């Protein structure tokens, strides 16, 4: 009889552990459900000539900082909005990522809220002249606690 009680106790303990692990894994996976995704091409031309100017072009699928000189800096503002509550993560990828930063990242965007964020391109004096490109990726994830 004691063996049977020990077996039931062990079985219940294992069952509780399996249920807890399942709940924890479900929550962990659920927080990374992508509900929307946007990829924007970006680029900078770095000039050696200090007299070279710059220009910015912006559209729905691109954000170019134009032609810049070493030591230069330019900012570009972008408005984000969503029809649903979303956790926004922004990733800058490519060889341009060393030069471009974003003012705010990893934030919650409420339904119908519009949020202005700033992308800043800063070219160090030591930058090698050339064409630098990449992608800005906007991930709209389902928040774990909505």
Image: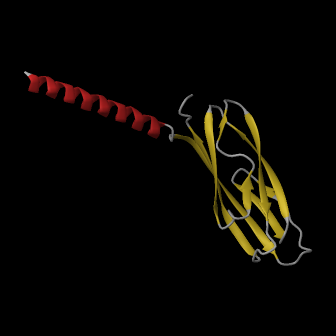
How far across and down, in percent of the image, does residue 146 sit?
57, 28
59 is higher (above) or lower (below) than 49? above
Q: Name the residue rendered at 63%, 42% in the picture.
A: 88
Q: Is 24 situated left or right of 82 in this image?
A: left
Q: Name the residue rendered at 71%, 50% in the picture.
A: 60
19 is higher (above) or lower (below) than 115? above
Q: Name the residue rendered at 14%, 23% in the picture.
A: 5
Q: Nearer the viewer, residue 85 or 9?
A: 9
Q: Is 135 situated left or right of 30 in this image?
A: right
Q: How many marks?
A: 0
Q: Nearer the viewer, residue 11 or 111?
A: 11
Q: Quadrant of residue 1?
A: top left
87 is higher (above) or lower (below) than 40? above
Q: Name the residue rendered at 55%, 29% in the picture.
A: 145
How far across and down, in percent of the image, does residue 64 sit?
76, 60
Q: Nearer the viewer, residue 16 or 10?
A: 10
- The extreme left residue here reads 1
Q: Is 117 situated left or right of 94 in this image?
A: right
How far across and down, in percent of the image, does residue 11 sit?
20, 29
């Amino acid at each position: 009889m004691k063996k049977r009680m020990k077996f039931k106790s062990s079985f219940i303990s294992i069952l509780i552990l399996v249920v807890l692990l399942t709940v924890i894994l479900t929550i962990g996976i659920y927080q990374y459900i992508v509900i929307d995704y946007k990829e924007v091409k970006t680029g900078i031309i770095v000039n050696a000539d200090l007299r070279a100017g710059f220009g910015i072009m912006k559209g729905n699928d691109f954000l170019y900082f134009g032609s810049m000189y070493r030591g230069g800096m330019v900012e570009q503002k972008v408005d984000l909005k969503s029809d649903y509550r979303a956790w926004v993560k922004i990733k800058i990828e490519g060889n341009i990522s060393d030069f471009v930063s974003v003012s705010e990242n990893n934030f919650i965007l409420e339904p119908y809220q519009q949020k202005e964020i700033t992308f800043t391109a800063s070219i160090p004096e030591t930058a090698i002249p050339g064409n630098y490109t990449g992608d800005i990726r906007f991930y709209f994830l389902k928040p774990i606690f909505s």
